[in-house]
Image (cartoon, rainbow, N blue to C red):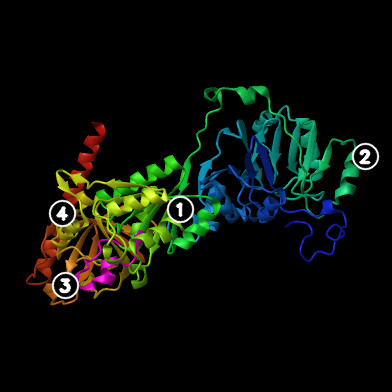
Amino acid sequence: MGVPTLACPCRVCHSNDPHDNRLRPSLLLSRNGQNVIIDTTPDFRQQALRVGLDRLDAILLTHGHADHILGFDDIRPFNIRQRAALPVYGNEETFRIIRRVFSYVFDDKPTLSTVPSVTLKLAQNPMKLLGIPFVPIPMLHGDMEVLGFRFGRAAYLTDFSQLPDSCMALLEGLDELILDALRDIPHPMHQTVDQALALIQQLKPRRAWFTHIAHDLPHEETNERLRRTGFPHVQLAYDGLDFEVAVAESEETRPARQAPPLSSTAFESRRLSTFTSSEAWASRYATCGHKSVLAIGNFDGIHRGHQAILRSAVARAQALHAVATALTFDPSPRKVLRPESAPLRLSTNAQRMEWFSALGLEAALVLPFTLELAQLSPTDFVEQILVRDLHVKTILVGEDFHFGHKQAGNVNLLKELGTKKGFDVLIIAPVQYRGEIVSSTIIRREVAEGDVSHAGRLLGRPFALTGEVVSGTGTGRKFTFPTLNLAAEQELLPARGVYITRTFFDGETCSRRSVTNIGVRPTFNGSALSVETHLLDFQGTSTPNRIEVRFWKRLREEKKFTGPDELRAQIARDIATANKFFSRLRRFRSLRQLA
């Protein structure tokens, strides 16, 4: 709880000795300009400011209790400054807690605000940080599995009640030992002072420091007691304690191939930063001296052609150490300028953000397309947005790119402005797939005509509808087969008919085989268009709030049957056909893997 402890009248909490003011325990290890933190306590921000921490290279977590993790969100400034995810090492139980407490970091949903960007790595074997091996020490904190760490000739063992005998050999030859000694009174999850002293006598470090100290132990009195009882080399740690740790020459010079194997499992948490103004992008990145590599376009559907532009932008940004950014618009310019001829959109803005992230982009600028923005001349658009705010180094566009008032700007003008303003322009040629130029126009036509297979090939993935599950008429459950009724968020729907699909529940990564009908239920004299999905292999009883339906193949057109019995028989045949399709697909994939 820290000392002083809230609402406590004891003499330690009211002590004038600055060493009796104790923030929650944490450790900073620095070497050759790199920094590693052990535990992000609720006081982490205050601790980092006190030492002027301007860089962070890794985080080690001992366990998931609140006093050791609740400062986790405060690593965001290091993500922004360093533009990289931070590796976080811990055990499985700690990661379960982190994922629950900081669920917004790991839910993979687009966000307009920053969140920590991390890579979770299981600390099962020694890992090399700061140029030396860090050895995890498994311990028990009551019945909770926790970790300590050895680094060089020092070790940090906080919050534990039992150290397995098998770990004793990992702690031989220590110069410095920092270990849990909560108080004199026994505690089910911590060591007492006497228990800590007994362990020190076994391990025989040259010096030892007590940490995780409750307000039961006054600093100077306890140190004096330790000296009197024959432990002059043991003291209470205090806020701001600083000392050097020796590194054995064999650890520092050992070739990498001889280092202990690292078998950590990594769970990536990559987060796309999204902005609705160029000023907001500048506030995040330009103030830290970062520049951008821009891919500009509507990116409706993010098909194979779009993917080529975006992947090139990511590669270019990596080479220039710049921010890979997609610049797009919502709504599309044509919807504002010529709404009567604006095409129906293939994808939602949320889908575009998801695919931007999957392709490795760091940021997306989604400018609201307004009449005011449309009035900007091509030169003003480049100078005010691309150069002044986005500090652009390279722009990537397609051959037919136009911009500015009345679409007066084209790729030739963009190149001229680039020469004057100091940025490069890369023109990405149209992508062909099996001899056919890929375009959103062609994909819209194929979806509208029901050829979702062809559309999927041009997209590079199945066409997908997303949305909330809504209540239907109950006709399917009563007369034929139960269905999930999707309120699709996309503007463009496939042609009426029955399709082989796969359905994802919100928050799940595994899909379910399904058959989906788009139509008006003519057998029951319906008039409203609906999207109804029947799951082929789902035995659950709960209904998801949201689903995504991916379209693989059209089975047939919608048809009016003589009654429920005939319709039910046809749906059974559709399901059998879908099952055969998925079985063939599974066999094909198995053969391809064997080959």
User: Which amino acid, mark 4?
Assistant: Ala
**For this view, does 518 lie left or right of residue 373?**
left
**Lower sequence index among marks 2 and 4:** 2
Give the Cα distance between marks 1 and 3.
Answer: 51 Å
The local secondary structure at tag 4 comes to: helix
**Lower sequence index among marks 3 and 4:** 3
The residue tagged 1 is 391
Report the mark closest to the observer, 1 or 3: 1
The local secondary structure at tag 1 comes to: loop
Residue at the outermost right position = 228
Q: Are marks 3 and 4 in contact (CB under 8 Å)?
A: no
Give the Cα distance between marks 1 and 2.
Answer: 65 Å
The residue tagged 3 is 520
**Lower sequence index among marks 3 and 2:** 2
User: Which amino acid, mark 3?
Assistant: Val
Give the percent coordinates (x, y) of residue 172: 71, 28
Q: Is residue 344 magenta?
A: yes
**Lower sequence index among marks 1 and 4:** 1
The residue tagged 2 is 228
Q: Do we see residue 25 in this rendering?
A: yes
Give the Cα distance between marks 3 and 2.
Answer: 89 Å
The residue tagged 4 is 576
- The part of the chain drawn in magenta is 328-347
Give the Cα distance between marks 2 and 4.
Answer: 84 Å
The local secondary structure at tag 2 comes to: helix
Report the mark closest to the observer, 3 or 4: 3
Decide: is 114 above or below 144.
Answer: below
Q: Residue at x 39, y 50 (%)?
A: 420
**Lower sequence index among marks 1 and 2:** 2
